[in-house]
Image (tube, coloured by chain):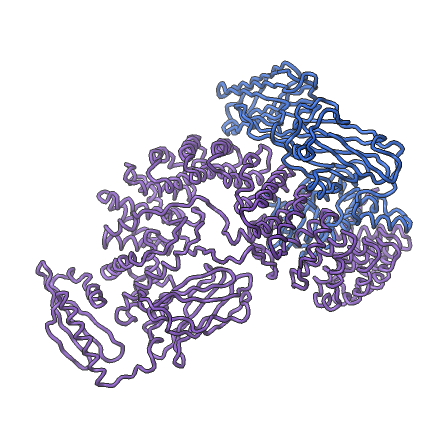
């Protein structure tokens, strides 16, 4: 039960103030400003108890979004609601800046009314809200349409309206994986996981029933079928037959009960884009890149850094947008860099050498070495340097976890198109999450 | 054109200007004006003066304008109740509007207008809307009932809205069901009107699969309040909700975890089902850690609870809690906490190398915590202790001030846990003495020096350097310094006498701190009386410290597990501690009030037992220390000064062996007061119950000095005049007994013994379910009937109870004779205390005796005494009766030929008392003699 919702700018001025419960007063608005925004010591938690009022906040682009409650409310829900509010506002008027909020305050109040009633979150899906709250005032709709709207937003399939028609039924699937790695300086993997997402963009008529097949170890064992490359969507040779997925999360459109019992992912997709599922794997991850840093502190005024980068994937694939960040101490006075490929530059503002390569084929090994001159006097020089890790950003055209879409079938019984008529596209993409090697 | 311009008008006369604009004929202008009003309202300006003008704009077919006017109305209706009535008509009309969105808007706003007078007008429209054909209106109406209940609960009950809500649970539309559940749960929390039954649960479980994510949260939260009838039902619910763990919404996941954690308790612990369920629980929680930092934080705080409750669930997942370089600091700190909890032999190497890495980070708090964590690992996993110590030494070499300090503090704990193993590193520690500037680190270092004084050659110099600045130190350091210097003296008495005297006088004469003075006096007297005993007390073996530290108290943990996902679980505090409403639901896993808590005073002593003090001091051990202190009091009365005056007052009032009684009482009381320490106490937080080696006598002394309050006044009660009823003494202090203040006295009324008690509740929640039990005692005192307190005692309320007692219970001789140990239970906990029942309540009404009988009886004990003394080589020389007094004269000869003469005076009138006068040429020979007499008589 959220008692109130406030939005402040970075100075602590109130932009939006909406009280849902009587137990909160405007004093709470000030309490948060004084104790958190203006606090001398930076507040170190997103959840704070001030007086007897609990505040949950998130800060984006200099704007504070705050939910307050005097009860023992559901903290997870409060955090999650704030996130949804940010998403909703973003989808209505772009970036969440002070200016944007001031310009749209009437709309925001209107939205908040639909998002939260008496502190209870109601509808937080922007695509649903957009069916009846428009930026340019309320659209004149007929009674028929009104009825349809209300029953749709409250109904079982709130995310899709009836009567959608496309001439060409098309379906795009993007498997986007973020690889996260923490490697010790000695090259030992401390932790690694892949956070993957299956994004779907669908242009399908009617209310299509879809069924997605993936090469999850569990579901494959369940159906006792081994995935062979004959799958309609599978375009590359399967290196691994199946992947062990640690955890799966589905969009609201997926029938969770059915997944639990039959391991089948079945759903009626929302029109347009949606994040169908999220998953996480930790075992057998194919790490696309390996970074070997070598840091030698020659003396107090000099340091040598050498970084070797290995592309650990098939030579016929190409990695893109590669950017290696090599940290240097804050008291660096000058850097001279030599690299075999790409461009490397010292960025004094970031205290790092940024080494960029547009493309790098699999199996290649490149290196970059630098000589760093250090200041030997002044405050900064005496402070200890904590050696931040070397981090890398990249994009590769495969799924490092080995995740594969085995099939996606579309059934629409009422309209006269079948699974074969639907044009389907699948794309795999591996990106860097937090990919760090300590040095 | 944007709306931001509305914020910029700050001219004078603005209100007047707005007024004209609001009353303008042009629709466009009107709308602009209302927007300006709302903008002013947002920034906190008072625009209530415009109330009638804004209300006038309400009658419009422009929905946007209507919404704005409603927003204004919700804000100011309370301050203008009379004018708010003007709006009622519009609401009633809007509730009939053909557009469902307008109907819903009216219902939604209606409930937010908190004006008493209006509420009754709203009942009819609300009832209609609850049966509206449109689900959007129904779902809004459901929430409106909760709003109305918040304002006027009686009205909601009278008008039958609760039943209507109940009907909505069977609605075809899942969102309506979800909102009805939310509203019902809130109403039930304040006042249980509808019982959640299995039929309702079935409905909810069906709706769960269909409704929106928030609806799922409402339903799951409602389910967490339901207790299934049997295992099968519990298992069924588990099966049906566990798919929710795969939901993308963190709130849904955590609420599911909450319900599952609760239901698991109901299932047989070793069943296969539980195994598979716990396997399912881990992945979703780990996944939450890849969400955004705010969610991670909430998840981590909850994981901390779950790991304490069921360590198995996440024991394989250590790696995911490794700190990432970019994690916000609050996430880092929480991860570290969880890491320590999950550390065990199999993963300790990994954990240690991580912790070492963290100890070189930049954030001071985080580094400190990491260093502390290394120490914790050493204590938790014995095999790793060596590595941990080596790591700590490496860190000390960095010479970073706060790292060194933190390392010293944890090394002290390691010394406590593994005595005589790592003392070789003391020299390294001593090198860093100068860098220590925080009290805790200084105190720890001083403790180490004192404890290992015999191995540190210049221990006296080191301590002396601390003593030089004694007055500038924090109390914690002063106390520790005092103890360490005494230890040093006992170990190396020859060259440290001056130092110890200096410290003792600093502590006793120049300090305003009562704790410090008390401790100083105790040491002083111990040392002057019997250095050997002092050695026994001060250098006693210390109890081991416990492995698991800062665990939550089990009952609190159980309570918090029922609140997973909520704010309580984030704060790790029970909801009652931060929510005003005392009606907050008190959910409990199982009624287990068995957890005992410590009530030790925190005087900050490192020798105290932070872990298991457990067993009360054995009765046999206590008397020897009593006598020791009895000696002290006899011999050393003079330097006691002012403090002694209070102490002497009590024994004088007591008849006969009053002094002994009092001391005995002092001895046995604390052993019950302080002994049942909770098995798990943070060694750092619970530094010190009292000097642990001699908890009993120290407590006794405190009490004698009048610090213990209750006991001293009870002592006074013993000597009370006949017919006098002992005033109530404090038996349980609210501060240390979870808010229960118990004052009481045992009195004799109309031929029966009564225990008069006043129970005061100083806690936040009502206290109930009181029960009382007596331990075996000398007179077989037991309650005649069970303790009956009809109604729960509400906060800040006091209840008077009179409990009739009988003397036909089991008998066991107590020390002192009239001591009774009592256990008192309520819904919160069990408390133990002891009291000395004034002897006069035992005086029977038929105590009248014939004169002759009296005389005969009187002679008997005298004769008895003489034979007893004779048997112990105390010889009766003469016997005399002078006006109601019986005088006995005795002679004693020591083996070294010193002769002692004694006169024993017995009062015949009034209370029976013995006065002993001793005479000898050598005064020292009289020491302890009264004690000897006492012992002879007792045998």
- Residue B348 in view, yes or no: yes
- B535 vs B523, nearest the viewer: B535
Specify the quadrant of the image occupied by residue B324. top right
- Residue A98 in view, yes or no: no
Q: Which residue is drawn at 43% across and 56% down?
A: B599
For chain A, the rendered hue is blue
Quadrant containing the C terminus of chain A is top right
Q: Residue at x 29, y 47 (%)?
A: B539
Specify the quadrant of the image occupied by residue B154. bottom right
- B140 vs B70, nearest the viewer: B140
Q: Where is residue B812 in the image (x, y as percent from the top left)?
A: 33, 66
Q: In this view, does A46 lie above or below B73?
A: above
| Chain letter for the purple colouring in the rendering | B
Q: In this view, does B54 lie above or below B4?
A: below
Is A128 left or right of B876, judged from the image as shown? right
Q: In this view, does B447 lie above or below A117?
A: above
Q: Position of residue A276 (x, y in %)?
A: 74, 37
Q: Where is residue B859 in the image (x, y as percent from the top left)?
A: 18, 78
Q: Where is residue A35 in the image (x, y as percent from the top left)?
A: 61, 48
Residue reaching furthest left? B897
């Amino acid at each position: 039960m959220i008692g109130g919702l406030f939005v402040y700018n970075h100075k602590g001025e109130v932009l939006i103030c909406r009280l849902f419960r009587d137990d909160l007063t405007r004093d709470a608005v000030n309490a948060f400003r004084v104790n958190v925004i203006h606090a001398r010591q930076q507040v170190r938690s997103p959840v704070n108890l001030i007086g007897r009022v609990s505040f949950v906040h998130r800060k984006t682009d200099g704007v504070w979004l705050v939910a307050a409650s005097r009860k023992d409310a559901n903290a997870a829900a409060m955090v999650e609601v704030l996130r949804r509010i940010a998403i909703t506002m973003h989808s209505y008027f772009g970036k969440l800046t002070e200016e944007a909020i001031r310009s749209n305050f009437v709309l925001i109040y209107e939205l908040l009314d639909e998002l939260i009633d008496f502190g209870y979150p109601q509808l937080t899906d922007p695509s649903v809200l957009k069916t009846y709250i428009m930026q340019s005032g309320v659209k004149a709709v007929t009674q028929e349409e009104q009825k349809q709207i209300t029953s749709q937003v409250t109904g079982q399939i709130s995310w899709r309206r009836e009567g959608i028609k496309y001439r060409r039924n098309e379906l795009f699937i993007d498997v986007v994986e973020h690889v996260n790695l923490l490697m010790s300086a000695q090259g030992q993997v401390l932790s690694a996981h892949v956070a993957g997402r299956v994004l779907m963009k669908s242009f399908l008529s009617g209310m299509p029933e879809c069924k997605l097949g993936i090469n999850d170890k569990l579901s494959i064992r369940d159906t006792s079928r081994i995935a062979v490359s004959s799958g309609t969507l599978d375009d590359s040779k399967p290196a691994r037959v199946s992947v062990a997925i640690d955890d799966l999360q589905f969009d609201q459109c997926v029938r969770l009960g059915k997944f639990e019992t039959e391991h089948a992912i079945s759903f009626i997709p929302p029109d347009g884009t949606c994040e169908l599922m999220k998953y996480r794997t930790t075992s057998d991850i194919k790490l696309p890149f390996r970074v070997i840093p070598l840091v030698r502190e020659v003396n107090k005024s000099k340091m040598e850094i050498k970084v070797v980068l290995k592309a650990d994937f098939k030579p016929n694939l190409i990695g893109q947008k590669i950017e290696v960040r090599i940290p240097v101490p804050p008291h660096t006075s000058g850097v001279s860099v030599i690299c075999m490929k790409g461009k490397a530059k010292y960025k004094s503002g970031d205290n790092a050498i940024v080494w960029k390569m547009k493309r790098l084929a699999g199996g290649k090994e490149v290196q970059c070495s630098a000589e760093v001159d250090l200041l030997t006097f002044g405050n900064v020089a005496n402070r200890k340097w904590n050696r931040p890790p070397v981090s890398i950003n990249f994009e590769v055209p495969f799924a490092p976890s080995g995740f594969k879409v085995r099939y996606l079938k579309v059934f629409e019984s009422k309209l006269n198109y079948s699974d074969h008529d639907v044009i389907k596209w699948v794309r795999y993409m591996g990106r860097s999450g937090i990919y760090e090697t300590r040095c | 054109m944007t709306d931001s311009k509305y914020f910029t008008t700050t001219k004078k006369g603005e209100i007047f200007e707005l007024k004209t604009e609001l009353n303008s004929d042009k629709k466009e202008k009107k709308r602009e004006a209302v927007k300006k009003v709302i903008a002013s309202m947002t920034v906190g300006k008072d625009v209530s003066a415009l109330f009638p003008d804004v209300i006038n704009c309400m009658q419009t077919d422009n929905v946007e304008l209507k919404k704005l006017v409603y927003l204004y109305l919700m804000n100011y209706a309370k301050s203008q109740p009379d004018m708010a009535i003007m709006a009622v008509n519009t609401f009633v009309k809007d509730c009939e509007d053909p557009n469902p969105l307008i109907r819903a808007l009216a219902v939604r706003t209606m409930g937010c207008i908190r004006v008493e007078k209006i509420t009754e007008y709203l009942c009819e429209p609300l009832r209609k809307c609850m049966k509206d054909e449109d689900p959007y209106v129904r779902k809004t109406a459901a929430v409106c009932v909760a709003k109305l209940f918040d304002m006027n609960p009686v009205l909601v009950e009278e008008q039958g809205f609760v039943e209507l809500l109940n009907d909505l649970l069977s609605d075809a539309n899942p969102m309506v069901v979800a909102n009805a559940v939310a509203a019902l749960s809130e109403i039930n929390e304040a006042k249980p009107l509808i019982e959640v039954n299995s039929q309702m649960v079935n409905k909810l479980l069906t709706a769960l699969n269909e409704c929106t994510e928030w609806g799922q949260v409402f339903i799951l939260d409602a389910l967490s309040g339901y207790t299934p009838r049997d295992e099968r039902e519990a298992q069924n619910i588990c099966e049906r909700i566990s798919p929710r763990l795969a939901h993308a919404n963190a709130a849904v996941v955590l609420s599911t975890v909450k319900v599952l954690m609760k239901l698991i308790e109901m299932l047989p612990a070793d069943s296969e089902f539980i195994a598979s369920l716990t396997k399912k629980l881990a992945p979703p929680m780990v996944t939450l850690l890849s969400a955004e930092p705010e969610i991670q934080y909430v998840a981590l705080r909850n994981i901390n609870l779950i790991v304490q409750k069921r360590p198995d669930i996440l024991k394989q997942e250590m790696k995911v809690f490794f700190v990432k370089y970019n994690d916000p600091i609050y996430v880092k700190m929480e991860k570290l906490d969880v890491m320590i909890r999950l550390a065990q032999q199999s993963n300790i190497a990994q954990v240690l190398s991580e912790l070492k890495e963290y100890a070189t980070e930049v954030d001071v708090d985080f580094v400190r915590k990491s260093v502390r964590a290394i120490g914790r690992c050493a204590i938790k996993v014995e095999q790793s202790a060596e590595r941990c110590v080596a790591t700590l030494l490496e860190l000390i070499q960095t010479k970073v001030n706060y790292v060194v300090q933190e390392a010293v503090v944890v090394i002290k704990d390691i010394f406590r846990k593994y005595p005589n193993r790592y003392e070789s590193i003391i020299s390294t520690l001593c090198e860093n003495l100068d860098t220590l500037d925080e009290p805790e680190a200084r105190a720890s270092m001083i403790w180490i020096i004192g404890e290992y004084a015999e191995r540190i050659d210049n221990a006296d110099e080191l301590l002396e350097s601390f003593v030089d600045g004694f007055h500038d130190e924090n109390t914690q350091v002063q106390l520790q310094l005092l103890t360490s210097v005494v230890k040093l003296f006992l170990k190396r008495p020859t060259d440290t006498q001056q130092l110890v005297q200096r410290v003792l006088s600093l502590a006793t004469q120049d300090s305003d701190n009562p704790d410090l003075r008390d401790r100083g006096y105790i040491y002083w007297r111990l040392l002057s009386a019997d250095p050997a005993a002092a050695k026994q007390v001060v250098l006693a073996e210390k109890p081991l410290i416990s492995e698991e530290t800062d665990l939550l108290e089990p009952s609190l943990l159980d309570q918090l597990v029922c609140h997973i996902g909520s704010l309580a679980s984030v704060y790790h505090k029970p909801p009652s501690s931060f929510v005003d409403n005392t009606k907050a639901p008190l959910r409990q896993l199982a009624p287990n009030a068995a957890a005992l808590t410590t009530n030790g005073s925190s005087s900050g002593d490192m020798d105290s037992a932070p872990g298991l003090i457990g067993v009360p001091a054995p009765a046999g051990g206590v008397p020897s220390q009593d006598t020791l202190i009895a000696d002290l009091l006899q011999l050393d009365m003079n330097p006691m000064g002012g403090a002694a005056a209070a102490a002497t007052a009590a024994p004088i009032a007591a008849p006969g062996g009053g002094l002994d009684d009092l001391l005995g009482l002092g001895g046995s009381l604390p052993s019950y007061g302080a002994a049942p320490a909770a098995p798990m106490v943070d060694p750092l937080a619970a530094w010190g119950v009292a000097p642990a080696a001699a908890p009993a006598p120290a407590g006794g002394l405190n009490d004698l000095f009048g610090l213990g309050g209750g006991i001293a006044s009870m002592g006074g009660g013993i000597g009370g005049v006949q017919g006098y009823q002992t005033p109530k003494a404090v038996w349980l202090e609210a501060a240390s007994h979870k808010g229960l203040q118990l004052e009481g006295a045992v009195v004799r009324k109309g031929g029966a013994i009564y225990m008069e008690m006043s129970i005061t509740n100083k806690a936040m929640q009502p206290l109930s379910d009181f029960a009382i039990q007596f331990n075996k005692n000398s007179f077989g005192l037991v309650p005649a009937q069970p303790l009956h307190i009809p109604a729960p005692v509400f906060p800040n309320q006091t209840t008077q109870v009179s409990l009739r007692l009988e003397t036909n219970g089991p008998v066991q001789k107590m020390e002192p004779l009239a001591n009774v140990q009592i256990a008192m239970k309520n819904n919160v906990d069990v408390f133990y205390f002891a009291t000395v029942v004034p002897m006069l309540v035992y005086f029977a009404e038929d105590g009248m005796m014939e004169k002759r009988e009296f005389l005969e009886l009187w002679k008997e004990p005298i004769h008895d005494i003489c034979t007893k003394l004779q048997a112990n080589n105390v010889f009766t020389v003469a016997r005399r009766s002078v006006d109601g007094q019986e005088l006995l004269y005795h002679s004693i000869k020591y083996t070294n030929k010193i002769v002692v003469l004694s006169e024993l005076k017995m009062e015949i009138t009034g209370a029976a008392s013995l006065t002993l006068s001793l005479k000898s040429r050598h005064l020292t020979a009289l020491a302890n003699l009264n004690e000897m007499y006492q012992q002879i008589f007792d045998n």
